[in-house]
Image (cartoon, rainbow, N blue to C red):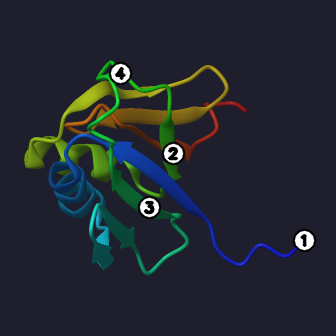
């Protein structure tokens, strides 16, 4: 198998809010849009996102999601500061995990959790 691209599909109640969130805070741009979907991409190695309108005829679901979209970044301190200035909904503040990963989470208006992570070995490691 030779994978040449990856896409994550998110079904949300408010496509426009999700698209704005990923564009404003994470640098995604609209690649294609159509009836009931918008395809978001970046010019780096980030996975593409297809944001789809949740089927409104289905019973409402909890706003909570078990899906986490995770991006490994460089300069997580600066990203944290920028996101705070922009007023992003940071739901897990920047912290270092015992294994050396620095991470923070933010959540879009639909409950999609986005994790930003950077590997910085602990002192003495």
- Disc on res. 81: none
Q: Nearer the viewer, mark 2 or mark 3?
A: 3
Give the crowd class for mark 4: few <14, some 14-19, many >=20 residues within 10 Å: few
* Secondary element at image label 1: loop
* Secondary element at image label 4: loop
| 112 relative to 4, above or below | above
CA distance for labels 2 and 4? 17 Å
- Pointer 1 residue: 1
- Pointer 3 residue: 49
Q: Position of residue 91 (x, y in %)?
A: 28, 25
Give the crowd class for mark 1: few <14, some 14-19, many >=20 residues within 10 Å: few
Q: Can you tell which quarter of the image residue 7 is in? A: bottom right
Of the numbered discs 2 and 4, the one sitting upstream in the chain is 4
Residue under the image location 49 percent in, 76 percent down: 44
Marks 2/4 in contact by CB < 8 Å: the verdict is no
- Disc on res. 70: 2
Answer left or right for 111 relative to 11: left
Of the numbered discs 1 and 3, the one sitting upstream in the chain is 1
């Amino acid at each position: 198998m030779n994978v040449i691209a990856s896409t994550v599909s998110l079904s949300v109640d408010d496509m426009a809010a999700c698209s704005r969130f990923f564009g404003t805070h994470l640098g995604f741009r609209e690649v294609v849009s159509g009836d009931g979907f918008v395809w978001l991409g970046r010019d780096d190695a980030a996975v593409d996102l297809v944001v789809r309108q949740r089927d409104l005829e289905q019973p409402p679901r909890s706003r909570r999601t078990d899906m986490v979209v995770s991006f490994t970044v460089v300069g997580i301190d600066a990203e944290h500061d920028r996101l705070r200035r922009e007023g992003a909904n940071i739901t897990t503040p920047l912290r270092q995990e015992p294994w050396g990963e620095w991470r923070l989470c933010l959540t879009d208006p639909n409950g999609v959790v986005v994790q930003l992570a950077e590997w910085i070995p602990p002192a003495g490691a």
